Image (tube, helix red, strand yellow):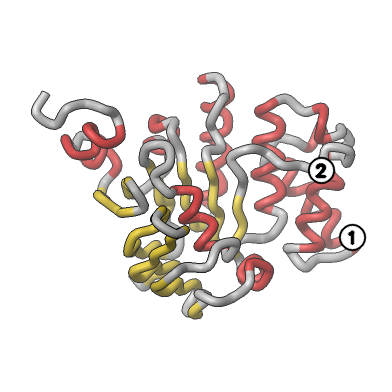
Amino acid sequence: MAAFLQLDQVSKAFGAVTVADALSFDVPSGEALGVIGPNGAGKTSMFNLITGTLSPTSGRILFDGQDVTRSSAAKRCRAGMARSFQVPQPFSGMTVFENAMIAATQAGGMHGRTAEQFCLEVLDQTELLDRANTLAGGLTLLGRKRLELTRALCARPKLLMLDEIAGGLTDAECGALIQTIRDIHARGVTIIWIEHVVHALLAVVDRLIVIDFGRKIAEGAPRAIMESPEVQEIYLGIEADA
């Protein structure tokens, strides 16, 4: 299957600090790819490189058949990339619906009644429809996480990138969010999901990659990756010969 997203030897350094080290991988259209690694491994920096908020020192990024390595973040967003952030960043003084509308009009390119109807459909999908008129600043953590997801979906993404969206949630809240993400994936949206809550990833993703010090150190079937001695030593702190 042809790659929908391709990172080809992508590197990024800030002086002596390397956050991406010849990073290469492909994501086929419709796949859900999980990304794990210890804190500081370069996972969020990878998202910043994909979305264009960071420029690589070297290498190429191809998306939907186009070389976007030097394209602006705004152009990549209009081409179909959208992401959530590890720390939710809503417009706190606006309602949930107004937050969704900003994404739909500014990133999704919709206007008027079309944008309004689309936002209502997304809010229903993310289980926030009954909170549409609530100020975003008054939402619970789960509500803010759902709003992050809503705003990303209102950009009408072909590629949805989730950055630790399950972090900080209870088991019950995490389970509800997993089902929402499963439903999104079932609709054909390509997903890359960075997460420390590994059981959430295993419930959704088709493949896992592991990153450490900006390098890809493993990739493959999720459960096989989690059983790898190298991954257990680097990610879980278990000695490989234990």
Q: Name the side, left or right, on which 228 lies relative to 160.
A: left
Q: Name the side, left or right, on which 116 lies relative to 103.
A: right
**Amino acid bearing label 2:** Phe
Residue sitting at x 73%, y 63%: 107
Placement of 42 over or under 158, stated as above or below? above
Quadrant location of the N terminus?
bottom left
Choose mark 2 or mark 1, whichever is in front: 2
Task: Name the residue at the left extreme.
Answer: 241
Q: Name the side, left or right, on which 48 lies relative to 89.
A: left
Report x, y in % for residue 198. Answer: 39, 32
| Few, some or many residues within 10 Å of mark 1 (<14, 14–19, 20+) | few
Q: CA distance from mark 2 to mark 1?
A: 22 Å
Quadrant location of the C terminus?
top left
Residue designated by label 2:
91
Residue designated by label 1:
113
Secondary structure of the residue carrying numbered label 2: loop
Q: Is residue 188 visible?
A: no
Q: Name the side, left or right, on which 133 lies relative to 219.
A: right
Secondary structure of the residue carrying numbered label 1: helix
Nearest the eye: 37 or 15: 15
Report x, y in % for residue 184. Answer: 56, 48
Task: Name the residue at the bottom extreme.
Answer: 66
**Amino acid bearing label 1:** Arg
